[in-house]
Image (cartoon, rainbow, N blue to C red):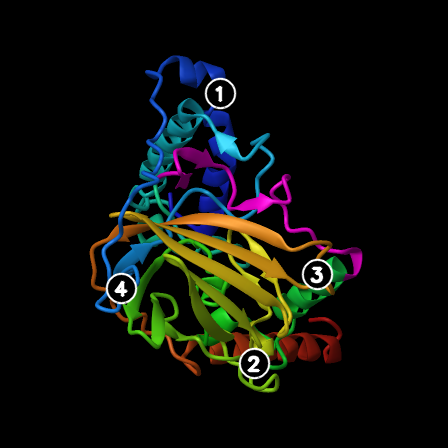
Amino acid sequence: MPSTLKTWLAISASLAIMASPAALAQEAMPSAPEAWDPDYEPPRMPDGTPSFQGVWSKASLTVLERTPQFDGLVISPAVATAIEQGREKAMEASNQPTDPNEGAPEAGNNVGGYNTFWMDPGTHFGVIDGEIRSSWIVDPEDGQIPYTEAGEAEATAAVSNMRNNFDDPEVRSAGERCTVGFGSTGAPPMLNVLYNNHIQFFQTPDVVSVLVEMNHNARMIRIGDEHRSDDLHQWLGDSVGSWDGDTLVVETTNFHPHNSVRTAIRHEVYLQPDSVVEERFTRVSDDAILYEFTVTDPDLFTQPWKGEMPLWKTDGPIYEYACHEGNHALPGILAGARRKETVAANGSSSGGQ
């Protein structure tokens, strides 16, 4: 049968069942991951700062907010292994060739989306210092974004407007418009999505650049600088950095208002242009960077909320994500809406025929 985004969601929902005691009993009990070496000495740039240079991946089964199948932040190795193995089997089954005798779908039904061949969300849960994590959010303890009542209403209205309004191209998501990747892949906090989860660091003493695979954006972090004018809104925000020992600390604000709604298959985040995100990058091993972030906006959240995520060293290069503003998708979306309106108007004027 064809593999679609709907199939992917069904696979994700089934993972909790695959971690049942019966399934665990059939598997050898895996050992816990090793903790990071507290005395690790990172490779360094000529100016003495730790080197983050190279390509890193955010791909993971761990998601931003904790899902109901998990009671706490840390997952046992046995449960994690069972879910990972179950996911692998489900993905293999979902990725089988389409039955040539199945026939065309009925008119008006969902014709499907990406085949799972194109999906690359990761194969394992994220590990932080030997702990397997169920969510990136570590504070609040429940692993959820702590919206205020007014903040949740504002976020819900903004998401609804983006999804249901086809009159203005600038209301559609930044991902559809090909200005910024879906789901906060590049603008901080940098989150993992369904595919294209790579980033690449380039360092100089004055600037650290973070190239994001989707949507091939490059964020320029100015070291030791001040924020620019409040009325200058960049797609990925205005980022200034400093060094706290061997940790790169980055503060970002002044986000573009058209990048406030950041939706993906597995999470939704809503920020305002003046929301503030602090990031901390610490190289903890040859193959891992600890990425920490804190999001602050008293208009939207009851408290600053914090997350931790590992970035894993991987082979490069990053290939171009050839999606650009004004491509074929957005004109097609708007034209389809106008066609639907025309058909409805004609049907009404002709007595509903």
Q: Which residues are magenta?
A: 124-150
Q: Please give the name of the residue rendered at 37% of the width and 43% of the height, measured from the top-left corner.
A: 1
Q: Position of residue 301 (x, y in %)?
A: 70, 57
Give the residue at mark 4: 48
| Mark 4 neighbour density, 10 Å: few (under 14) some (14–19) many (20 or more) | few
Dot 3 or dot 2, earlier in sequence: 3
> Mark 4 and mark 2: span between their CA atoms?
47 Å
The residue under label 2 is which amino acid type? Pro
Residue, disc 3: 156
346 and 63: which one is in front?
63
Q: Nearer the viewer, residue 93 or 37?
A: 37
- The image quadrant of residue 325 is bottom left
Q: Based on the picture, tell me whether residue 142 belongs to the magenta stretch.
A: yes
Q: Nearer the viewer, mark 1 or mark 2?
A: 1
* Residue 221, image x, y percentages: 41, 73
State the separation of the CA atoms marked 3 and 1: 34 Å
Q: Within the image, what quadrant is residue 263 found in?
A: bottom right
Q: Check disc 2 and report the residue beneath it.
A: 169
> With 192 as the anchor, is 208 left or right in this view?
left
